[in-house]
Structures are given as structure tokens and as C-alpha cells.
Image (cartoon, rainbow, N blue to C red):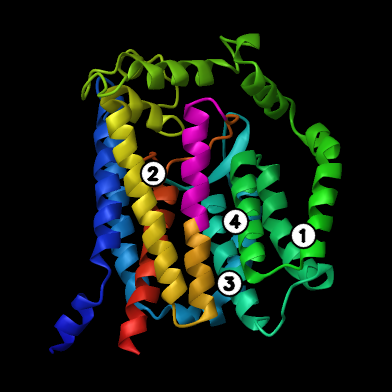
Amino acid sequence: MSRYARITDNIDWGLITTALAIIFIGLLCLYSSSRGTSMTIFYKQLMWIAIGMLVMIVVFVVDYRVLLRSAWPLYILMVFGLVLVLIVGREISGARRWISLGPLGIQPSELAKLIVIIWLAYWGEQKKHIQGYGIRELMLPAFFIFIPVGLILVEPDLGTAGIVTLISCTLMLLLGIKRSTFVGLLIVFISAMPFIWFSLKEYQRLRILTFLDPSRDPLGSGYHALQSKIAVGSGGLLGKGFLEGTQTQLRFLPEHHTDFIFSVVAEEWGFAGSALLLLLYVALVTKITQIGFKAKDRFGTMICFGVAAFFTLHIFINIAMAIGIFPVVGVPLPFISYGGSFMLINWICIGLVLNIAWRRFMF
């Protein structure tokens, strides 16, 4: 067998094909939501997809185990980026989340999601001799996770901070927490709920209250959720057709290219199109999880599980927002929502998983 055949035969083409199928659906929806206005968003998304695929190839080629030596430098880079965005970041709607690089904007908090996965996988690899983590063992990783979460909350970006926290909790549970420790932490979290509530900004509390009763502010904070549910419900079984979604085309649906792009899918392609997209997502996460179980080392396993959690949380929260069963917290839909930094991270995640899968056969 030639070296080329040895390389290509062991690539998980199913994972790549699934990601590309999801991207194709996303491009159709983005084209529809951009039609009649500026197509800049659509063309920028194409550019980021191309850049992301090139970066994925680089990530795939370089042995993922070099990240064991790079975990701390990456962590420091992450913290530096999160601090820098608070100082020189571009302010949009009262939040500093983007660093301008010429015509492009980079969102350090998106990169933080991936780096936290890598750092926790590294920590788990270093502590793999421990059977069941207690409070003492969890204090160090909790401290180092609190730093990026705190900086992201200052931006403020509640959705991203929540995603980072949930990914971290998922990985800690998978690494193995003592039952007594888990129960104790759960009690502490429940007890802290009043403090968390009053520490939220006014608009964040209003979003939660409006989620519980959208009619309390139908033209204000409840407008997004109400219009999204109208779009989803009006799609019916087969949808209104490509470019025929009234909520989208008449611009009733806000943030239709980012947070509420699933509503575009549901309105124009109906339940059938939405179900197809969900099946593709299930296939993607299932494949990543299977690769994690078969990884050669604990480090690779934890990266795969972290990536699976990353995709699962984004998919669940975004779709839950669109159908009105979760507060609007600004969480994008993987490979579908417009956003350069997020698309780049999506492809890096795929590159890492492909790398881990491929090296089971190469070494």
C-alpha cells in the first residue's frame, strides 16, 4: 500500500461529509436570509468556510499530542486575548467581544471554548492515576476555569460563559468525580442561585423573565422569541419553500443569520428539513463520541468528548432558543450560524477529532 493510500484510507470521510452536508444547509439558509439586502454576510461566510477547511487540514496533519506540551501556552494566550478584548475590543450593543484585525473581527471567547477543552484534557491526562476526584483535586482546575469564565462575563457574554462552564462540568464528570463531591457541589450551586440571579445585569434578568412570559414585553425583549416561534410554527411539515419564508424575507425575524437561523430552516424547509438537520447533527456527535471511545490515549478521548459536548450544547441551546423553551442567550448553531471565529473553531474541532481517529491506525 502506498503512503498516500495509507493516509487517505484511514481518514474518517464520514465525519467530513456530515460536516459539509450541514454547511450546505447553512449556506442555503444564509443565502435566503441575506437575499434582498447586502450579500456581504454570505460571501464572508464562504471565505471563513474556506479558511476553516485549510486550518482543519493543518490541525489534522500535526500530531495532536503536541498539545500536551502546548496546553499552558495556549491557556496563557487565551487569558491574554480575553483581557485584550476588554481593553481594545470593538464595542457593539454595550458588549466588547471582538478584536478588529483590519476588515475582520476575531472573538477570543470562541477560542476560549476550545482551549478550555484542551487544557482540561491535559489536566486529566496528568492526573489519570487518581481514582475519583474530590473537592481538593478539583480546586485547581476550577480556579483556572473560573478565570476565563469571569473575563467572558465582564464582556458581557452570558451565553459563552455558560457554554464554557457546562463543557468544563461535563469533562469533569467524565473524568470521574466522587458521588459525595458531586452531591455537595450540586447543593452549593442550588444555594448560590439567588446570588447568581442578583449578579446578572438588568437586561439578562429581563430575558429570563420574558422567556417565562413572552407576552410581558412582546415588542421589546420578548420580540425575538415570539417572532422565532411564529417562523418555526408556520413552516408546517414541508415548509414554505426556499426563499419563501415570510418571517425571514419580510425581516420580521431578528438575528436570522446568527442566533435564530434554525427558525429559517424550520420556516422554509418545515419539520422534514429540521428533522434532517437534527439527524445530521446526531450523526456528527455520535461519530465524534465513537472516535473518543477508540482513541489511543486518555488525552485524545477527553478532547473528543469535549468536542462532542461543545457541539451538543450549542445545538441544544440554539434550537431550544428558537422554539421558545430556553432564554435567548446568544448561542450560535454549529456550521450554520454566521460568524468567522465560530466557523473557524468548528473546523478546528473537526480537524482535532480526525487527527485522533487517524493516528489510531498510523502508530
N-terminal of the pair, mark 2 or mark 4, is: 2
According to the picture, the residue beneath numbered tag 4 turns out to be 167
N-terminal of the pair, mark 3 or mark 2, is: 2
Q: Secondary structure at mark 2?
A: loop
Q: Amino acid at mark 3?
A: Ala
Q: How far apart are labels 4 and 1 at the CA level?
A: 16 Å
Q: In the visual, does 201 lie left or right of 39? A: right
Q: Amino acid at mark 2?
A: Pro
Q: Which quadrant is the C terminus positioned in?
A: bottom left
Q: Quadrant of residue 215?
A: top right
According to the picture, the residue beneath numbered tag 1 turns out to be 182
* Label 1–label 2 contact, CB within 8 A: no
- Graded by Cα atoms within 10 Å as few (under 14), some (14 to 19) or many (20 or more), the crowding at tag 3 reads many
Residue plotted at (32% across, 19% down): 236
Q: Which quadrant is the N terminus positioned in?
A: bottom left
According to the picture, the residue beneath numbered tag 3 turns out to be 121
Q: How far apart are labels 3 and 2 at the CA level?
A: 34 Å
N-terminal of the pair, mark 1 or mark 2, is: 2
Q: Quadrant of residue 358?
A: bottom left
- Graded by Cα atoms within 10 Å as few (under 14), some (14 to 19) or many (20 or more), the crowding at tag 2 reads few
According to the picture, the residue beneath numbered tag 2 turns out to be 103
Q: In the visual, does 23 lie left or right of 131? A: left
Q: Quadrant of residue 124?
A: bottom right
N-terminal of the pair, mark 4 or mark 3, is: 3
Of marks 3 and 2, the one in the foreground = 3
Magenta run includes residue 115 = no
Of marks 4 and 1, the one in the foreground = 1
Residue 135: % across, % down: 83, 67
Q: How far apart are labels 4 and 3 at the CA level?
A: 11 Å
